[in-house]
Image (spheres, rainbow, N blue to C red):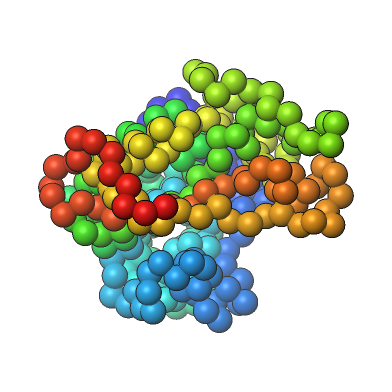
Amino acid sequence: MSNHAEHNARVWDQLARRGAPLTRPATEADLRNPLRAVDPQGWLGDSIAGWRVLCLAAGGGRQSVLFAAAGAEVTVLDVSPEMLAHDRRAAAERGLAVRVVEGTMEDLSAFATGGFDLVAQPVSTCYVPDVVRVYRQVARVVRPGGLYLSQHKSPVSQQATDQPAAGGYTVAEPYYREGPLPAAAPGRLREAGTLEYLHRWEQLIGGMCLAGFAIEGLVEPLHAQPDAAPGEFAHRGQFIAPYVRVKARRADSESPRSKPTILSV
């Protein structure tokens, strides 16, 4: 395992033991409509019963439990043993079958080629330096015509300060950079202690296309509130969309495309 993966595994283990917000399993409210909870855009249709789903870098007991409750055959992979312990416990409490695998999103060699109908990845690509490497791993394990639903941190959100100045927020980090971002204080925008990397749009979206995916949908989930106080997460969201969510479909060809192709955004 790479140094950054080992480092982030230790940090997420600590966060999971403390019960940090992003390490908490699915709630009873989520489970009333589990498919809606994991797919608010309705990109997956009315049913995923029987689908083979890989919840990628998605430990914590939320994603895996919700997909399993929606009828899917679920595998969850995460680098943090403590996060995966939440998946085991949450699935057992609800009588759900979830396969748990410890590993990194950068190496999916444990899985068969074309073994999944859907790969679902919440915000986590920011923890690896090479996002295109992840995309190529995903392209191999999702079947031709299968789906890849992923959410990412917006690069400008990673560049900008978390506190306002002169009525707005300042872009403080260079866009073209190497290595991890500077250490961050605890907050909604960053997980303190983790190694986090900025990925440019050409890497986030262009790289996905180069790996063999066609983009079918792209949204920036709304996190803005007009009455939020300056400095609050929802106030910053009026200026900067913190996340982007992408629906992509694996090309029918077994080989990756040589040029990016975007069907609709």
Identify the image quadrant of residue 149: bottom left
Residue at point 39%, 47% (across, down): 102
Tell which residue pokes out farthest to the front in this image: 264
Residue 223: give x, y in percent of width and height. Answer: 67, 55
Identify the image quadrant of residue 42: bottom left
Q: Is residue 148 above or below residue 53?
A: above
* Residue 119 seen anywhere in this rendered image of the structure: no
Residue 237: give x, y in percent of width and height. Answer: 70, 48
Side (left or right) of 205 relative to 112:
right
Residue at point 32%, 77% (across, down): 49
**Nearest the camera: 253 or 179?**
253
**Nearest the camera: 77 or 144?**
144
Residue at point 79%, 36% (across, down): 168
Tell which residue pokes out farthest to the left in this image: 254
Residue at point 28%, 44% (across, down): 261
Side (left or right) of 77 relative to 59:
left
* Residue 63 seen anywhere in this rendered image of the structure: yes
Quadrant into which the N terminus falls: top left
Residue 156: give x, y in percent of width and height. Answer: 60, 34
Side (left or right) of 22 relative to 42:
right
Q: Is residue 236 above or below residue 166?
A: below
Residue 207: give x, y in percent of width and height. Answer: 34, 36
**Nearest the camera: 107 or 9?**
107
Side (left or right) of 254 relative to 53:
left
Identify the image quadrant of residue 257: top left
